[in-house]
């Protein structure tokens, strides 16, 4: 059964990303504000995963961020970019490849796993319900995110990486709405209305 967690601790071991950078990635993904993030340098452990080695927090509800090419955590040819173990997760940032939305969506993906929500079923068992939801809850998504999701739901899917991450973020919003609806009851009034107004202004003036 899904278990909601409000406060997450981020242990940032990245040499490329500082706290403002990570927060910009979280904002780009539009992770609901019902979840809070605090940055602390806490103890961690390094554990093997197949032939690779990953840093993990010692305490529950921790997110460890590291650089994919950090020699302290060798990947040895393994191409995983993140993982979760119960209520802890670890995520790699890939320099020269990741952009804000993509990395923010990766963090969100693993957070959902930590809360016992299967975030791997967008193209599986959740596909029909997700694509139907896109048309019934449009106010939860930006126009760009909604339109990309509608395209993806059609038989001819776009292969553009940026568009796919827009769809992934839409899917994670769907999972949050289905499993933790309280996240949208209060924040939607102010945060989403402001976001929609800014979007309308940008469209009008083509900013």
Image (tube, grey):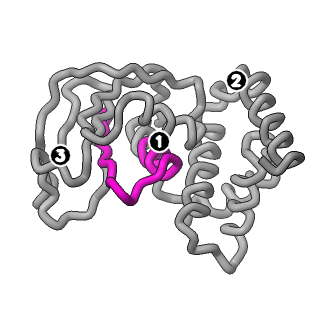
Q: Residue at point 49% right, 40% down?
A: 25
Q: Are marks 3 and 1 in contact (CB under 8 Å)?
A: no
Residue hosting label 3: 54
Q: Are marks 2 and 1 in contact (CB under 8 Å)?
A: no
The answer to if 88 sits in the magenta stretch is yes
Circle 2 packing at 10 Å, graded few (<14), some (14-19), many (20+), is some
Q: Are marks 2 and 3 in contact (CB under 8 Å)?
A: no
Q: Secondary structure at mark 3?
A: strand
Q: Is residue 150 left or right of residue 13?
A: right
Residue 165: % across, % down: 55, 57
Q: Residue at point 70% right, 23% down?
A: 187
Residue 179: % across, % down: 59, 37
Q: Secondary structure at mark 2?
A: helix
Instruction: Give the mark, 2 or 3, whose residue is nearer the N terminus.
Output: 3
On the question of residue 124 being in view, the answer is no
Q: Secondary structure at mark 1?
A: helix
Residue hosting label 2: 187
On the question of residue 60 being in view, the answer is yes
Instruction: Give the mark, 3 or 1, whose residue is nearer the N terminus.
Output: 3
Point out the stretch of residues depicted in magenta. 86-109
- Above or below residue 198? Residue 35 is above
């Amino acid at each position: 059964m899904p278990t909601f967690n409000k406060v997450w601790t981020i242990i940032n071991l990245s040499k490329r990303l500082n706290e403002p950078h990570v927060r910009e990635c979280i904002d780009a993904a539009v992770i609901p504000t019902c979840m809070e993030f605090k940055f602390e340098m806490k103890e961690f452990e390094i554990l093997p995963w197949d032939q690779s080695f990953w840093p993990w927090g010692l305490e529950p509800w921790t997110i460890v961020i590291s650089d994919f090419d950090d020699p302290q955590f060798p990947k040895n040819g393994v191409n995983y970019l993140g993982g979760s173990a119960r209520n802890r997760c670890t995520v790699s940032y890939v320099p020269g490849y990741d952009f804000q939305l993509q990395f923010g969506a990766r963090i969100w993906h693993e957070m959902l796993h930590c809360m016992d929500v299967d975030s791997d079923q967008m193209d599986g068992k959740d596909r029909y319900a997700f694509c139907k939801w896109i048309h019934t809850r449009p106010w939860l998504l930006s126009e760009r995110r909604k339109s990309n999701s509608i395209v993806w739901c059609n038989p001819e899917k776009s292969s553009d990486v940026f568009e796919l991450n827009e769809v992934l973020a839409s899917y994670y919003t769907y999972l949050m709405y289905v499993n933790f609806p309280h996240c949208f009851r209060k924040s939607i009034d102010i945060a989403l209305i402001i976001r929609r107004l800014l979007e309308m202004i940008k469209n009008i003036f083509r900013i």
